[in-house]
Amino acid sequence: MAHLRKRFVTPLLRKQAKLWPVVGLLGPRQSGKTTVFSNELELELELELELELELELELELGPCISLDDLSTRTEAQRSPNTFLERQPSPCVLDEAQKAPEIFDAIKLKVDQKRVPGSYFLTGSSGFSSKIGIHESLTGRIALVNLHPLCLAELHAKEFRPSLTPTQKRPRFTSSELAKSLDSGGMPIPAFLRDPDQRKAYWDSWIETTLVRDLSRFFKRGYDVDLTYQLLERMGSVLREGELPSLKHFSTPARKLRDLFGVMEETFLLRRIRCHELGAGTDIWLPFDAGFAAHLMKSARGQGALLSLARTLVWNEWACQHSYQGVRLPRVYIKSAKGAPIDWIDTQGTPYRIVESADLVGKSGWEERSLAAAMKKLGAKTGYLVAPVDAPILPGKKGGIGILPWSAWS
């Protein structure tokens, strides 16, 4: 099947399974979490025997036990300890957050006998107290994020670690990357050629997420119609090429923060904080370029192109960091009057995404705003990220360089 691709998260899962008794794989609905466990993951666990010998064992994972199934979920909720006793080892529980009672039972099992790679949990929302998980698995669980397919996964290339890209030429041209802007990286819609089919997919996906998943976070007072309106408004903001923040919405700020917080918890949105030296507020970006294109109703124009590029590049940044086990700083910077700078990496280097190569070096506006951010941050180098096919690196003493959109691919 076209949408079945090797996922770069698999080696990290194997590594964590050797260290932790519980491994959680979190990501958006239908991003491929179950497929990873069903088709890709073979565990090689180092188990210490009583005689202090180490033995390499290759263990096969049993079938994913889905807590989406009502009867299975009901059993897990009513008698979680008995439910776990009947499961194979290693055990894979799909959508574990839907039966929060199971977490205490897993904690008890792990505390009785701590064996690496005993339980694998997937979730399309975070494992937090918001869904009734009061006793966490802190110190017992490793959490791994699964993102939409990055460019290298889409094109079935090998993973090439590249947190700070300096290669002379990336693997994908700007025209190849442009083909992924509308389709994004979610495993099913990314391979649908018919725009009407993609639209039908996203309509159904959004309905299920908003009606079923988001409602679980609100005991009462959840307004699904308002949530639809917020996403529609976000599409309008994205069409203008702006970074969505609370100021773009008329909904009371407190209620808006709650709704956006839940959308972050269910991986619909990425929250990006403004640097402490900046003058901006939190911004919120769609988790996938295909999702962003759907919200913008497949609009064309420079503003829409910039929003799609931002969303796609942010996913590349997220994949690079997550799959190397490195924390991704979700930080941007904006001055009181200047243009926003999209990202600041762990070294304090600023990056500004632009929608056209023609903007680079012409008016100087992009360079001036980037130079101002560099000065404020005390950074010697900064980068414009543009639809070009080869990077132009700064000099040895620093300055402004240019990187392709696909530089991290």
Image (spheres, rainbow, N blue to C red):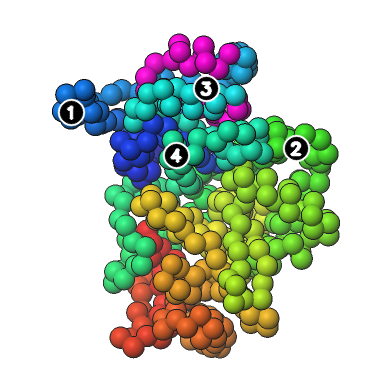
The disc at residue 139 is 4
Do the numbered discs 3 and 1 sit on residues whose CB atoms are within 8 Å?
no
Q: Are marks 2 and 3 in contact (CB under 8 Å)?
A: no
| Numbered disc in front, either 3 or 1 | 1
How far apart, in angstroms, are the residues tagged by discs 4 and 2? 28 Å
Cα separation between marks 3 and 1: 29 Å
* Image quarter in which the N terminus is found: top left
Q: Label 2: state its secondary structure.
A: loop
Quarter of the image containing the C terminus? bottom left
Of 395 and 373, nearer the camera is 373
Q: CA distance from mark 2 to mark 3?
A: 25 Å
Q: Which mark is residue 218?
A: 2
At label 2, the amino acid type is: Phe
- Which mark is first along the chain, 3 or 2? 3
Mark positioned earlier in the residue sequence (4 or 3): 3
Q: Is residue 272 above or below residue 401?
A: above
* Dot label at residue 105: 3
Q: Nearer the viewer, mark 1 or mark 2?
A: 1
Left or right of 362? Residue 298 is right
Marked residue nearer the N-terminal end (3 or 1):
1
Could you tell which of marks 1 and 2 lies nearer the N-terminus?
Answer: 1
| Magenta span | 79-100
Alpha-carbon span between mark 1 and mark 2: 50 Å
Q: Tell me where residue 8 sits by quadrant.
A: top left
Q: CA distance from mark 4 to mark 3?
A: 15 Å
